[in-house]
Image: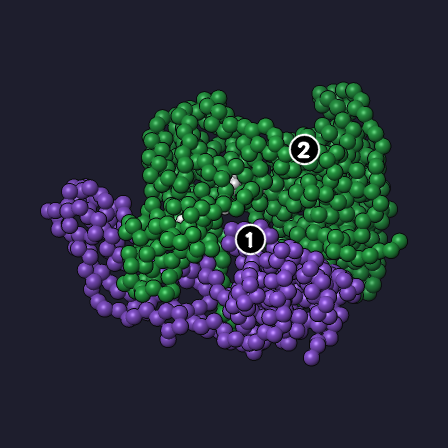
Chain colours: A purple, B green
Amino acid sequence: MQAKVPQQGNVVIAGVGGQGVVLAGNIIADLCLSHGLDVKKAEVHGMSQRGGSVSAQVRFGPEVHNVVIEQGSLQYVLGFEWAEALRWLPLLAPDGLVFASSERILPPAAQRDRVAGGVNYPLAAFEHPRVRAVDAESLAKEAGNVKTAGVVLLGALSTELGFPVAAWRDALGRWVPKKALEANLRAFELGRAWQDTAPPKPLHSSPTQQARFRLQLEEAWCKGCSICVDVCPERIWQLDALEIARPTAPERCTGCRICEKLCPDFAIDVVREQESDLLHLAGGA
Amino acid sequence: MATEVSTQQLLLGNEAVALGALHAGVRVATGYPGTPSTEIIEHMARIAPESVQVQWATNEKVALDEGIGASLAGARVLVTMKHVGLNVAMDAWMTSPLVGVNGGLVLLCADDPGMHSSQNEQDSRYLGKFAGVPMFEPSDSQEIYDFMREAYRVSEQFDTPCLVRTTTRVSHSRSRVLPSAAEAPGERSFERNPAKYVMLPVYARMGRERLLERLGRLAAWCEQHPFTREEMRDTAVGVITSSISYQHVREVLPDASVLKLGITHPLPKERIRAFAGKVDRLFVVEETDPYLEDAVKALGLAVEGKTFFPQAGELTPELVRKGFIAAGVLAPQQAPAAQDWPAAVARPPVLCPGCPHVTPFMVLRELEAYVSGDIGCYTLGASEPLRAMDTCVSMGSSIGMAVGMWKAGLKQHPIVAAIGDSTFLHGGVPALADAVWNQADLTVVILDNGVAAMTGGQPTVEFGANVRGTETARIDLAGVCRALGADPVVAVDPYDVGAVHRTLLAATRSRGVSVVITSRPCVQAPDKLVGRRYEIDPGRCVGCQLCMNTGCPALGWDLEAEPYENRHRVRIDPDQCTGCTVCAQICPHLAIAPASRG
Ligand SMILES: Cc1ncc(C[n+]2csc(CCOP(=O)(O)OP(=O)(O)O)c2C)c(N)n1
Ligand code: SF4
Ligand code: SF4
């Protein structure tokens, strides 16, 4: 069944730098324009190149004033990345719909389980009746180009935002580089046949219980070369007034044993104090 | 005329600036990059014929000086910058209205409410008023185009530079533009006229008289101007507004009467009074400072504004709605049922994989140096995990601030100024001369990547090309520093961790002003650079995550390998690694090596 050609509405495209968010927004805006609708599009530029979030908002209708979408009125979210899509949920209209890629891109700052408390990425499983997870990455690969994942999602959106399929394809043709057009059209078709996949599985970061370590120094063997001071990623070792290495914050030891292995005089022992739970990884639990 | 609505006419605000200026017949366009104004000059370089001179200047003051010179020489000229850039150009800006113009001179200044990518949130409308020039505030791309066209006419008609002030939302939104016929302004030649063009006090006094007399004429002119638009609807509430706030008001209060101001200096006082007389309750809705509100109050009118609408940050339709609810204009809304949404991910910007700015900061942190920082991609050296920058105020401040720290007696650790190449040539050169002259003991690290990377990779002066890519002169940074008397001046490859360490250690131990230039191209611009990729042997990796202290975003959890002591081992994302080798150099377990394949 083909959905009706919309007379007004709005779409948010959300992702991270380099995923083609701005381009996807241009395609939708172009499509609206070619159907005689007024359209405005807001882009968030700036830090995008440096791995930050990128979003584009498109609003269309007979006459559009504002470029930004108001809370509670957001109709469609195209999430090129899982958590970026979920970011927009608080704005979603009650009958709004989210098409989210099930791909996760964890920001570097979230991946620091050596330093406690570093994770601020929604790792838990999340399901919501208005959120559709689409395995856009696999479908894009099937289309022959991973970079077409965004177009897969455009295909999924086209089943709801009912501009004629030919018009979608024309708009793609105007914006996508000639070389890549064929793969993009395939991706669009695969997207149109989208199926709700399972949302991304929960991911655990830090173990529930960290192992603890005791640092033992054979003082007589330490000659104050300060190699351990330099290599410890946690900067635990320091030389005291007598040029003997001292662990200043032993509780921070993560048990990497670099100091133990690199001490030329075998003066350091890293002793594991207690067994801890096993870490559950993706797919576990 | 058949108005075929085509994609070309869905223009970014900044594209509309360029198109408007081009159709007004500008012959020179210059500026200094800065978000959200950067795309204007770049777009101009794409659409303008070769006969139009389009270029980046070394800083905003130079850009405006070029603009004034071109105008006096008879050309219509466009000068662009971001809000803080106008502060840099302030000296010339304040005097140029006394001199006036020959060819039309329009300065486009883009403010950044909400500080999406800026160091402050100034409301530059005060600077238009301060200089006493006509100021335009467009609210979408069509208005930008039309206002640009009009600004050139006004500039020449009234013999004054004009200011067009946009904001991030207006500059970075796309909306429909219907261009009008391009004009070819008549030839104007340079006329020698010292009494008008040489600001000796005796002539400047005359210029000041001209300025005040002109302001009187402009005040009358703006009353009648179609850009001052009264939209009468329900008269219970009247709103005076401009720029993007107009769009918010139309959306939130579609039935209210509106006085939409396209020209916000001078202000059409009579129109404001008349409008106030027609409505029961008068509001001003504007972003950031109460520029309009104070002016309306000064007319003795009862008006409400900042009591209900925030002064900090960007306005949104929600905030405007909230304000009108608080004011009792709109009925309170049923709060949407509280939902348990997942916490929004924090995705702070990070330095790119292989960014040459990484190692200098790793070493500076190691040396515990006091690092007086500056503005560019490298400002990210202040955040986790590098965390090696102590101060950063405005472009070019680093060296002067370092001199001040030294003079104040900060001696426990070495003092280092860290500054990018574009920033050094923007405002660092006079400060380096000052440091040498005033005999400070400090080290200047010039992070030379050949471009202004933060703003999208515009070429800098030692790059040897300008915005159109054609070859230009090239400047030798080390030669400049030596000529200013810095000693030693050494260059080092930032991909060589040991060398960076040795060089910085030696430089910070030497007396006087030393300069270390870390020299490697940005991996993003002008070309995307990729070398031989690296990979981690999970068997050797002990999950110490020391490599992740570089902040390289290609390094992340290895979700497939068995964890080591409950911590994830590290994996390199082959799609992101640029092969800079830095992580391999610091891995204590020698677990990182060139990828076996490709
Ligand atoms: C006065 C002023 N003008 C312009 C800007 C915008 N701006 C921020 S960073 C930057 C470029 C910095 O280039 P560079 O110093 O070479 O450092 P890079 O980003 O290349 O590391 C510019 C132009 C600004 N913040 N302030
Ligand atoms: S854009 Fe260039 S200078 Fe900026 S973080 Fe990336 S590599 Fe570094
Ligand atoms: S070599 Fe290492 S530090 Fe350099 S880009 Fe690759 S993963 Fe990042």
Q: Chain of mark 2?
A: B
Give the amino acid at mark 1. Answer: Ser
Residue at (57% x, 44% y) in the render: B455
The residue where tag 2 is placed is: B64
Q: Quadrant of the N terminus of chain A?
A: bottom right
In this rendering, do the residues under marks 1 and 2 share a single chain? no
Q: Quadrant of the C terminus of chain A?
A: bottom left
User: Which-is-in-front pick, marks 1 and 2?
Assistant: 1
In front: B367, or B475? B475
Residue B399 position in % (x across, y down)? 47, 33
Q: Chain of mark 1?
A: A
Residue B499 appears in the picture as rendered: yes
**Residue A100 vertical placement versus A113 (above, below):** below
Residue B270 position in % (x across, y down)? 84, 48
B388 relative to B212 in the view: left or right: left
Residue B326 position in % (x across, y down)? 66, 65
The residue where tag 1 is placed is: A48
**Residue B53 vertical placement versus B305 (above, below):** above
In front: A181, or A209? A181
Give the amino acid at mark 2. Answer: Leu
**What secondary structure is found at the residue carrying circle 2?**
helix
Residue A151 position in % (x across, y down)? 61, 64
Q: Quadrant of residue B173?
A: bottom right
Residue B461 appears in the picture as rendered: no
Q: Is mark 2 within 8 Å of ligand 1?
A: no
10 Å crowding of disc 1: few (<14), some (14-19), many (20+): some
Residue at (48% x, 21% y) in the render: B483
User: In the rendered picture of this protein, how many numbered marks are placed on residues?
Assistant: 2
**What secondary structure is found at the residue carrying circle 1?**
helix
Residue at (50% x, 76% y) in the render: A198
